[in-house]
Image: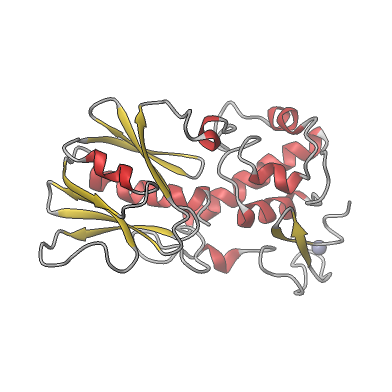
Amino acid sequence: MPELPEVETICRQLGPEITNRTVIAAGSHESGKFSPARKAKGKRFLQLRRRGKYLLAELDDQTELIVHLGMTGQLKVMETDNQRSVGSDYERAWWVLDNNKTIIFRDVRRFGRIALVEKGDYSQIPTLRDMGPEPFSSELTGEELWRRTKGRKQRIKTQLLGQRVIAGVGNIYGDEALFYAGINPSVRSITRVQAERLLESLRMVLSQGIKMGGTTLRDYRNLDGQGSNQDYLQCYGRSGLPCLECGSVLRSRIIDARSTTWCPVCQKR
Ligand SMILES: [Zn+2]
């Protein structure tokens, strides 16, 4: 599933393509998960930004078009071709712009979602409404991250993935950050010092992910093609292989339905 670096990469690439462009036609798959895409017709994009794993496109009538890529969602920019029928090949939504470009949302498994809301009103999207701070927010400190984890009963890995403690982290960057911070993914509480290290590690792995254009393991594509961060992963997906820090064999198990990899030595309980 696309996480913060993947969505940020798409946001940076797509933003200049749509800013100040007007949607002259829009269409979608009939599912209510995608049909709000049609409501953007006739409106102009003011700006595109990212919040957690969501893309938020502000429109010129005080509304926002919200796109969540789900597991397999992809956005592509194509030259508008009136001969080609959009809607085939898992294309779930599309917007024809006034610059001869068409933005296409393709989503094989249909876990993605599109919504159109009054600007800033996320009451119908609880994950977005209740989302924790952005990892790169200058107001977020290790102390604050520690405070946000305190008293929660879930395992730290699950807390990170839940989006309420901090925004944008999923399975890949969660495993990577916990590995670099030396924190066992199964613990239910962390110390202030560990929280400092965790925030530092999160910022490091997320900024590297952005720099590499995201991590492409299966479906993720940015507008230019594949990301390359998969070549730099130290922990995620390396179960059974030696730890690059200490040489111990990395382990994995399912934690709250998510496959989790860690080093039994570097990330002692
Ligand atoms: Zn190790």
The total number of labels drawn is 0
Report which quarter residue 56 is drawn in: top left
Residue in the picture at 29% in, 25% down: 62
> Does 74 sit above or below residue 127?
below
Q: Position of residue 168 (x, y in %)?
A: 55, 44
> Does 250 sit above or below residue 135?
below
Q: Position of residue 143 (x, y in %)?
A: 73, 28
Q: Position of residue 14 (x, y in %)?
A: 31, 49
Residue in the picture at 49% in, 35% down: 125
Task: Indicate left or right for 40 with 239 as reference.
Answer: left
> Does 19 sit above or below residue 103?
above
Q: Position of residue 109 (x, y in %)?
A: 46, 62
Residue in the picture at 60% in, 44% down: 203
Task: Indicate left or right for 146 with 225 as reference.
Answer: right
Task: Indicate left or right for 202 with 193 as reference.
Answer: left
Residue in the picture at 50% in, 55% down: 2
| Residue 112 vs residue 32, the one in the foreground | 32
* The image quadrant in which ligand 1 is located: bottom right
